[in-house]
Image (cartoon, grey):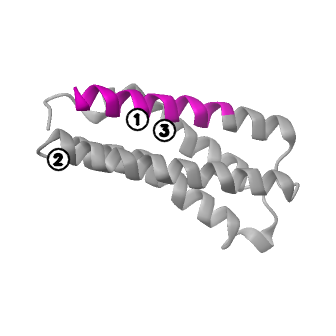
Amino acid sequence: MTTHHWKNLVVWQRAHSLVIDSYALTNRFPDSEKYNLASQIQRAAVSVPTNIVEGHDRSSSNDFIRFLFISRGSLEEVRYLMFLARDLNYINEDEYNNFEKDCSEVSILINKLIKSLKT
C-alpha cells in the first residue's frame, strides 16, 4: 500500500514490544498453563503486530483498515486474557497495570491509524 516499511510504524513497534512483554510474563506461568492460557495469550499477542504487517502491504487503505480492526480485536483478546491471568494470580497487580497501560497505548495508536486512513 505504501513505500514506507512497516517497521517504521510506531504502532507496529509498540505492538511488537507488547508481544515481547507477553512472552516474558507468560513464560513464568505454571507448567499446567504452558499449552493453555499462556499459549493463547502468546498467539493473540502475536496476532496484533502480524495483522498490522499484513494489512500494511495490501493494495488499498480499506484493506489495511480491515486488518487493523482484526489487530484491535486480537489486542482486546490479550487484554482480557491478561486480566484473567491476574485474577488467577499468574501475574501481580503491577505487572497487569503496566501491561494494560501498554495495551491502551497500542489501542490508541491503532485507532489513530484507522482514522488517518479513512481521511
Residue at horizontal 83%, vertical 34%?
Answer: 94
Q: Main secondary structure of the magenta part?
A: helix
**Secondary structure type for disc 2:** loop
Q: What residue is drawn where x is 68% and y is 57%? A: 81
Residue located at (86% from left, 44% from top): 92
Q: Which residue is mark 1?
A: 12
Q: Is residue 118 magenta?
A: yes
Q: CA distance from mark 2 to mark 1?
A: 16 Å
Q: What is the CA distance from the residue labelled 2 to the residue labelled 3?
A: 19 Å
Q: Residue furthest front?
A: 119
- Element at label 3: helix
Task: Identify residue for label 2.
Answer: 58
| Image quadrant containing the C terminus | top left
Q: Earlier in the sequence, mark 2 or mark 3?
A: 3
Could you tell me the amino acid type at mark 3? Ala
Residue 17 appears at what percent x and percent y?
Answer: 54, 36
Q: Is residue 115 above or below residue 56?
A: above
Instruction: Give the x, y percent position of residue 109.
Output: 45, 29
Q: Quadrant of the N terminus?
A: top left
Mark 2 or 1, nearer chain start: 1
Mark 3, Cα crowd under 10 Å, few <14 / some 14-19 / many 20+, is many
Q: Is residue 18 left or right of residue 98?
A: left
Between marks 2 and 1 in the image, the one whose residue lies nearer the viewer: 2
User: In the image, is residue 13 part of the stretch drawn in magenta?
Assistant: no
Q: In the image, which disc is placed on residue 15?
A: 3
**Left or right: 43 in relation to 26:** left
**How far apart, in angstroms, are the residues tagged by discs 1 and 3?**
5 Å
Look at the numbered disc 1 and give the secondary structure of its residue. helix
Tag 1 and tag 3, C-beta contact below 8 Å = yes
- What's the amino acid at mark 2? Arg
Q: Amino acid at mark 1?
A: Trp
